[in-house]
Image: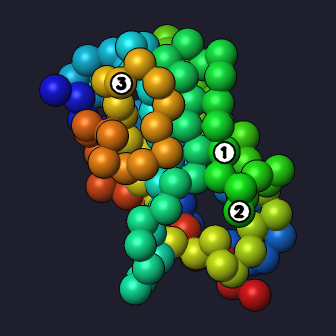
Amino acid sequence: QVQLVESGGGLVQAGASLRLSCAASGRTLGNNGIGWFRQAPGKEREFVAAISPSGGSAIYSDHMKGRLTISRDNAKNTVYLQMNSLKPEDTAKYYCAATIRPWLPREGSSYDYWGQGTQVTVSS
């Protein structure tokens, strides 16, 4: 079992940047792909980005591509999501999740462990 805790969210103005962190406890994340998802009130959860266990490959959502960088530090058991040029429509609760699958899924149903989320609010 692995526990995931997100941090780094907050209230920012449009155009600002935030770096979210996903810290794991319970066991190492070094064997898991890690994904970030977000969910705004009244909307479905959507995929944001994911990174392979080694950090050697990453995938991004089309709607945020170019404004995101996902990275990981396996020695710290932590995955990061750098978000730049934030827009009001990026307002949502952001979740990290770990998968045991040997590929990087975009669908949330393929992730096995989830954190509680961190709120990101972008004002115009």
Question: Percent from the top left, x then y, of residue 66?
Answer: 82, 50
Tell me which amino acid carries mark 3: Arg
Q: Secondary structure at mark 1?
A: strand
**Closer to us: 2 or 43:** 43
Label 2 or label 3, whichever comes before in sequence order: 2
Q: Quadrant location of the N terminus?
A: top left
CA–CA distance in space, label 2 to label 1: 9 Å
Tell me which amino acid carries mark 1: Tyr
Say if mark 2 contacts mark 1, CB within 8 Å: no
Question: Percent from the top left, x then y, of residue 23?
Answer: 41, 34
Residue holding disc 2: 63
**Closer to us: 84 or 60:** 60
Tell me which amino acid carries mark 2: His
Q: Quadrant location of the C terminus?
A: bottom right
Residue holding disc 1: 60
Examine the rendered structure and indicate whether residue 46 appears above or below residue 77: below
Q: Residues within 10 Å of mark 2 (few under 14, many from 20)?
A: few
Residue holding disc 3: 101
Label 3 or label 1, whichever comes before in sequence order: 1
Horizontal side of 35 relative to 83 (left or right) equals left
Q: Residue at x 49, y 45 (%)?
A: 106
Examine the rendered structure and indicate whether residue 17 appears above or below residue 14: above
Q: Residues within 10 Å of mark 1 (few under 14, many from 20)?
A: many
